[in-house]
Image (cartoon, helix red, strand yellow):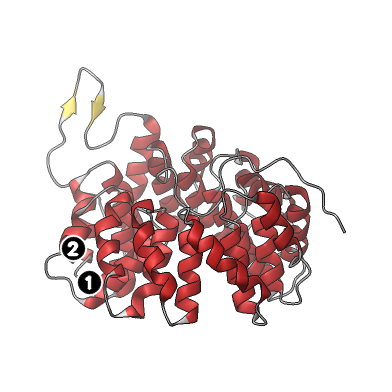
Amino acid sequence: MLRKREIRVLGACVFFLFLGTSSCYGGDPGTRKALTVARKTIATDGIQVYDRMLAAGALALEKLQEGEQILIEALASPSRLERRAAMSNLLSAGDKRVFEITTEDADADFDLDLLEVLRTTPREEAKIFLQRKLADPDRHSLTQTLDAILIGRHQHLTEEVESLLTLSNGRDRQYGMIVGASLGSKKAIEDAKPLLRSPRGGERERGAVALGFSSDNHEEIANTLLKLRNDPEPGVALASWASLSRLGHSEEATKQLVLALLSGDDRRAPLAAGALKRANANVVIEVAKQVVGSETIHFLVLGRVIEAVGWARSVPAREILKRALERDQDEHVRLQSLWAIGWRGRTEELPLALESLEDPELPIRTMAAWAYLYGLQGGVPQNTGTVQQEVASIEQPIMN
């Protein structure tokens, strides 16, 4: 059993008597409880690095120096896992000091770690750093850089991304098409169309992904994608359905994605979960409704479905997340659900995180504390991620 040591809060607490609040413990009861949980986690012997960084991140969200100091010190850790966890939590708290280090004396590994974090934690402040990485003649980190641009929707880098469409490396060039298309580049869309006729499954899949980001010529592009819906390569077919969900074919796309997720197929199911993160938000939530609680879906695949729910923040999902948080669910799924609650930042879902502050498992309590505080601040920045938030085109029938 883990031993707990006495918590000693560093520094003096400044009490605002006229408000009845404290700078150490937050203003509302939920915040105070979340901060208490975070402090208890930090004061627990033998905890996992990730839990300690997450607890420090919860404190940093409230601009408490005790949490910020732990994270800043962890940036110098020889453990890349600890360093990345610290970066992620600093960025989530809106702390820009990570980018100051990259312009001073950071080594190549530090930059790579930051790129990995930016692939999942989008920040507007990253634009100068990403612009510098795009200009780096050493292309070994190009995929990570493009991922970060894609997830952060850094439109100001559209021109630089378009310059990659002439690269000799086909895979890099095609990934540039996907990211360019996501930023609204018509050139990237046009360059991606021939990929749908490629004899290589990977190229057809990348073409299908890119065309899903098109903002016009929906009928023409949908008709092109419909030709791939029965492609022998499951990655191609599922990428096509995810893209079609953005173009007015939500009902059939939902059906096909659910079938793949519940197939028990070790290849199709993970591919469907990955494709779901590029689908329309309504489809993401409808798919999740049908697969959460199913006994045929692997817990890791279900975790990725809940991840997509985290990005589909424009559509309510309280009941889905409540079911995914039940004690009979795998801990991975429960943690992912709490992350999604924080990421989405929807007020009506935050009580689920509050309830989990009483959970008997330390990782669950710690994630709940972070999720409540992050969600209370509005969650992930708007206009980020690859899920289509707006309503898709009017439902279109599938013509055989």
Q: Label 1 vs label 2: CA separation?
A: 7 Å
Crowd rating for badge 2 (residues with CA inside 10 Å; few <14, some 14–19, many 20+): few
Answer whether residue 138 is visible to the viewer in this image.
yes
Q: Which residue is painted at 30% across and 44% down in the image?
A: 61
- Do the residues bearing badges 1 and 2 touch, measured as CB atoms within 8 Å? yes
Q: Image check: 76 left or right of 322?
A: left
x, y percent for residue 339:
48, 52
Residue 6 or 141: which is nearer the viewer?
Answer: 141
Total tally of numbered discs in the picture: 2
Provide the residue designation for mark 1.
77
Q: Which residue is painted at 45% across and 68% down in the image?
A: 176
Crowd rating for badge 1 (residues with CA inside 10 Å; few <14, some 14–19, many 20+): some
Q: Which residue is painted at 25% across and 62% down in the image?
A: 129
Q: What is the secondary structure assignment of the residue under circle 2?
A: helix
Provide the residue designation for mark 2.
73
Quadrant that contains the C terminus: bottom right
Quadrant that contains the N terminus: bottom left
Kind of residue sitting beneath label 2: Glu
Residue 242 or 339: which is nearer the viewer?
Answer: 242
x, y percent for residue 124:
32, 50
Q: Image check: 120 left or right of 267?
A: left
Residue 175 or 252: which is nearer the viewer?
Answer: 175
Answer whether residue 3 is visible to the viewer in this image.
no
Q: What is the secondary structure assignment of the residue under circle 1?
A: loop
Q: Quadrant of residue 131?
A: bottom left
x, y percent for residue 388:
57, 48
Vertically, is 139 above or below 271? below
Kind of residue sitting beneath label 1: Ser
